[in-house]
Image (tube, helix red, strand yellow):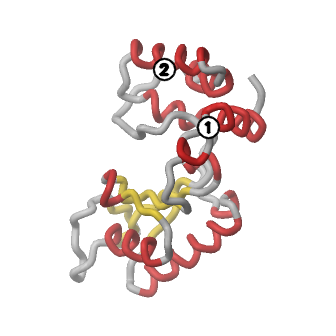
Amino acid sequence: MAADLNLLVPEFKQKVEELLGKCNKQGIVMRSYYTLRDPYEQARLWRQSRPSEHIKYIINDLKKDGALFLANCLESVGPQNGRWATNALPGYSWHQWGEAVDAFWLVNGKSEWAPDKLIDGKNGYKVYAAEAKKMGLTSLGSTLDDWPHVQLRQIEVSRAYSLTKINALMKEKFGKI
């Protein structure tokens, strides 16, 4: 996992540092644990908890549509096990673009994952999401129950770029088939 804020696009890095600082001033310590995620790691996360028939269908669909690099990302990582982690296919998460961060709430030196736990009347994830929103960032906490996730853009990757463009840019940035 990459937690390095330097892997984010400069505009977003600056905003994340400001966001973490604003949380800290309120006594909420948030620590990044995911910044840039390559499409292979995204494929691993997406494949978790999905039946093999569905995975094969999506891989074939990507190939049929000419997205060979993205299909290869899904195919090459092989079977994965685990709980549901994401709905975003490789290339379809702003993590691959350096425009998303996942952060956890640090309480007494330990990660706290509960979005409903209150300490001194505050929940770290709710503060983090509210501050992100004030800064024009997008938190997926209240919409997708993904409280650690904040991204630069409000729009989905699929609305910003065509499948062909996503495939080409991911191939250019992360490797060849």
Residue at the image position 46 percent from the left and 32 percent from the top: 46
Residue 159 lies in quadrant: top right
The C terminus, quarter of image: top right
Q: Is residue 94 above or below residue 89?
A: below
Residue at the image position 34 percent from the left and 71 percent from the top: 124
Marks 1 and 2, how far apart in space?
Answer: 16 Å
Q: Residue 9's spot in the image, x, y percent?
A: 69, 61
| Number of marks present in the image shown | 2
Residue at the image position 72 percent from the left and 39 percent from the top: 169
Q: Nearer the viewer, mark 1 or mark 2?
A: 1
Residue at the image position 36 percent from the left and 28 percent from the top: 49
Question: Which residue matches tag 1?
Answer: 162
Residue type indicated by callout 2: Ile
- Neighbour tally class for label 2: few under 14, some 14-19, many 20 plus, Cα within 10 Å: some
The reply, left or right, for residue 143 in relation to residue 7 is left
Q: Is residue 21 above or below residue 145?
A: below
Mark 1 and 2 residues: CB-CB less than 8 Å, in contact? no
Element on which disc 2 rests:
helix
The reply, left or right, for residue 147 in relation to residue 99 is left
Q: Is residue 173 above or below residue 74?
A: below
> Which is nearer the eye, 141 or 112?
141
- Neighbour tally class for label 1: few under 14, some 14-19, many 20 plus, Cα within 10 Å: few
Residue type indicated by callout 1: Ser
Q: Earlier in the sequence, mark 1 or mark 2?
A: 2
Q: Residue 73's spot in the image, x, y percent?
A: 61, 26
Residue 58: which numbered mark, if any? 2
Residue 15: which numbered mark, if any? none
Element on which disc 1 rests:
loop
Q: Residue 176's spot in the image, x, y percent?
A: 77, 27
Residue 5 lies in quadrant: bottom right
Q: Residue 35's spot in the image, x, y percent?
A: 58, 55
